[in-house]
Amino acid sequence: MKNEMNSPLSTGLQLSVVVPCFNENPHIESILEGWLQELRDQRLSFEIIAINDGSLDGTGRVLDKLRKENPEIRVVHQLNTGSAKAYRRGYELARGQYVLSISANGRCEPSDFQLLWNQKTGSSLVIARRTHRLDGFFSRKFTSFLSLLARRLFKLNVEEPGIGFRLFLREPVIPLLKDIPKEWHSFHWSSSVLVATHSPNGISEVKVPYRHRLERKSPFRRTSLFKSGWYHLREGLFLKWQLRGKAVAHLISPFSVQSHSYS
């Protein structure tokens, strides 16, 4: 009964938007108000799930205020676990037919949503590819490394397999995430790999303009990038070994529901 109550058909929601928030007080209100306006203009039935990931700057109070003023917003307060676990929790709570993940730092504009939404037909996962990137040399090289790793290990040919700005069908994708250990750093990268493994033609890539972060600088310093690259390599190799050990029937079964089933 619980699963039925949370199904897209029972809730009637077309879209769940998941946004982890950590110390985003200077701008989170304006960002969420922008997304509310965009999705209302699109006349979609939606919810925004804001995960307050242990913020210390009053972000939680701002989110609670927005929740009282906007029925579409759901707020979850938790101790700091990092963005990967915050995204995962938001995905598990999502009730929409589709799930959109965004960042709270202004990297994805509400106006970019339509680019992904228009590409959803026939795809289980739509991911963004940033154009005219103006971030640092090492950040660009790190992205290239993740793309090369996905191509060499899994023959997944996309530019940004680990990007957080993505739209996916809830029913076929959420069950796949259970194969990703909770302590892994490569959560979004691994989820892209799993979708491609189960449905080779199920991923679409859409160009979106590059956006600078708001207020806070990127948390990825050079040493952090090298460390994250090592984590992705180690976890990618383990995932490849893990997938080889599974029966083909088991791999395909979670993807029995295709995107055209939600017409």
Image (spheres, helix red, strand yellow):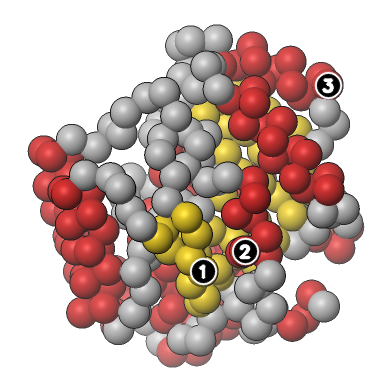
Residue drawn 30% across the image and 83% down it = 155
Q: Residue furthest bottom?
A: 248
Tell me the kind of residue under disc 2.
Leu
Q: Nearer the viewer, residue 223 or 77?
A: 223
Residue 76: x percent and y percent?
63, 28
Residue 184 in view (yes/no): yes
Q: Which residue is mark 2?
A: 115
Q: Which residue is mark 1?
A: 206
Rendered view: 154 above or below 73: below
Residue 39: x percent and y percent?
77, 47
Tell me the kind of residue under disc 3.
Glu
Lower sequence index among marks 3 and 2: 3
Residue 67: x percent and y percent?
76, 24
Lower sequence index among marks 2 and 1: 2
Residue drawn 64% across the image and 23% down it = 29
Lower sequence index among marks 1 and 3: 3
**Could you say whether the residue bearing mark 2 is in a helix, strand or loop?**
helix
Which numbered dot is residue 69? Answer: 3
**Could you say whether the residue bearing mark 1 is in a helix, strand or loop?**
strand
Rendered view: 33 above or below 167: above
* C-beta proximity under 8 Å, tags 2 and 1: yes
- The quarter holding residue 193 reads bottom left
Give me the C-alpha separation between circle 3 and circle 2: 28 Å
* C-beta proximity under 8 Å, tags 1 and 3: no
Q: Is residue 60 left or right of residue 193?
A: right
Judged by depth in the image, the label closer to the viewer, 3 or 2, is 2
